[in-house]
Amino acid sequence: MNFNNSKECDLFWEAYRGCAEENRVRPDRSPFYVRRAKDFSKYSASLLAGHPAVESGNLPVQVIPGRS
């Protein structure tokens, strides 16, 4: 997904909102959840910006217990 494309980005956040509402978030509260997720996304991207592992493409692989 290309997050530089605002249409794709808008579709993603609309799907995120829909998923939140499917999981018992009231429609009047779902914009709060979307805003929080967007803020976290921007924050985590700023933490990773310029990190050598990101620049070289050598991100560590996360191991999920019980899966190989």
Image (tube, helix red, strand yellow):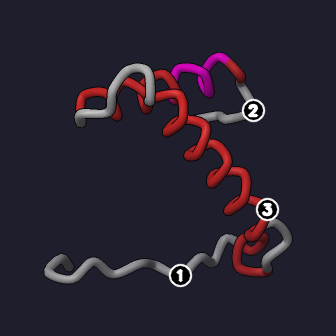
Mark 3 surroundings within 10 Å by alpha-carbon count, few (fewer than 14), some (14 through 19), many (20 or more): few
- Percent from the top left, x then y, of residue 17? 43, 27
Q: What stretch is highlighted in magenta?
A: 7-12
Give the alpha-carbon distance from disc 1 to disc 2, as whole Å. 25 Å
Q: Main secondary structure of the magenta part?
A: helix
Q: Which amino acid does label 1 sit on?
A: Pro
Earlier in the chain: of badge 1 and badge 2, it is: 2
- Percent from the top left, x then y, of residue 35? 61, 37
Observer-side mark, 1 or 3, equals 3
Query: What residue do we see at 35% from left, 34% from top?
Result: 20
Earlier in the chain: of badge 2 and badge 3, it is: 2
Q: Work out whether residue 55 or residue 12 is closer to the camera in this orientation and state it.
A: 12
Q: In which quarter of the image is the N terminus?
A: top right
Q: Which amino acid does label 2 sit on?
A: Asn
Above or below, comparing residue 39 to residue 57 in the picture: above
Write down the residue under mark 1: 60
Earlier in the chain: of badge 1 and badge 3, it is: 3
Q: Residue 53's image quarter?
A: bottom right
Residue sitting farthest toward the right: 50
Q: Residue 68's image quarter?
A: bottom left
Marks 2 and 3 in Cβ contact (< 8 Å): no
